[in-house]
Image (spheres, rainbow, N blue to C red):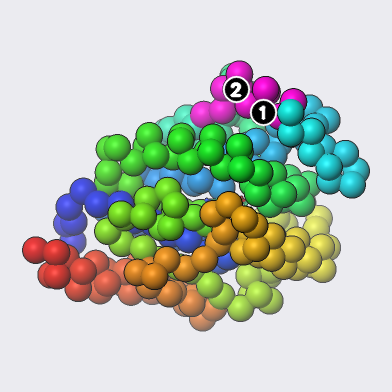
Amino acid sequence: MTIPDIIIAIDGYSSTGKSSFAKLIAHEFSFMYLDSGALYRAITYLTVNEGLIDKDGQIDSVNLKKRLEVSDIHFSYSPLGSKTFIGETCIEDKIRTLSVSDYVSPVAALPFVRDYVDGRLKEFGKKRRIVMDGRDIGTTVFPDAEIKIFMTADPEIRAQRRFDELVSKGSNPIFDDVMNNLRERDYIDSHRETSPLVKADDAFILDNSDMSVREELFWLKGLIQGKLDILQ
Ligand code: CDP
């Protein structure tokens, strides 16, 4: 199936498999994939690593803002996918740990952090032909995206997926910690003042509790077909 240069925006709750789906879409249609969460995770890694957050979760916003202005957070692309860097250092594995997940939602709720990431993401959108996943892509970053998907799944299934992912990367997580992190992030992401996680009015809901990623692709192809028939 060939499709024109459009933007596909995928939003939804934590661990709904947005990135796996987005990567498959990118591969299938030769789109560029952008993981907006990686930018929030990289900023959170910076915050934790440079001691800009205390044990109670209080963020030193003044210094984080200054640090962000001079930081060189970027993606490096290869046929195997993209990796997140700060300067010369690859931080791809470090940003996926539970210790970063624990703080990412409070950091991502800061308006100056959202402004920074928003600006970076919109730059990518100038090229079109991209698929981007996150929490506010269809509502704030690309409200004009041609295809918008809102992903959800049963919380127990989502926690199990994230648990399995962490185990496969060599971690030894506790299931309840994973579950609590997921619930807490869902709550903060959905209730923050700036760009909360909400379904865009024109987004299609995809509940993949009992679906494989291949079935998701099949579902999407039907959706795109219908949408393009309307657009043409
Ligand atoms: O992989 P998972 O869905 O668990 O999370 P992620 O996409 O890596 O995003 C990590 C966190 O970044 C989320 O829980 C949000 O707090 C924040 N985020 C956001 O606020 N807006 C986005 N567009 C993407 C991520």
In the picture shown, does residue 200 fall above or below 142? below
Instruction: For ligand 1, tell me if the residue under mark 1 lies within 8 Å.
Output: no
Q: Is residue 169 visible?
A: no
Magenta-drawn segment: 63-74
Task: In the displayed orientation, state which residue is furthest to the bottom.
Answer: 210
Q: Residue at x 30, y 54 (%)?
A: 144
Task: Identify which residue, 217 or 167, lies in the foreground.
Answer: 217
Q: Secondary structure at mark 2?
A: helix
Using the image as rendered, state which of residue 181 and residue 166 is in the foreground: 181
Q: Is residue 232 visible?
A: yes
Q: Identify residue for label 2.
A: 69
Amino acid type of the residue tagged 1 in the rendering: Lys
Q: Relative to 2, say whether 130 is above or below.
A: above
184 vs 201, left or right, is: right
Q: Residue 14 is drawn in which quadrant?
A: bottom right
Residue 130 image point, x, y percent: 33, 47
Q: Main secondary structure of the magenta part?
A: helix
Seen as rendered, the residue at the extreme right is: 55
Marks 2 and 1 close (CB-CB < 8 Å)? yes
The three-letter amino acid code for the residue at tag 2 is Glu
Q: Position of residue 31 (x, y in %)?
A: 30, 47
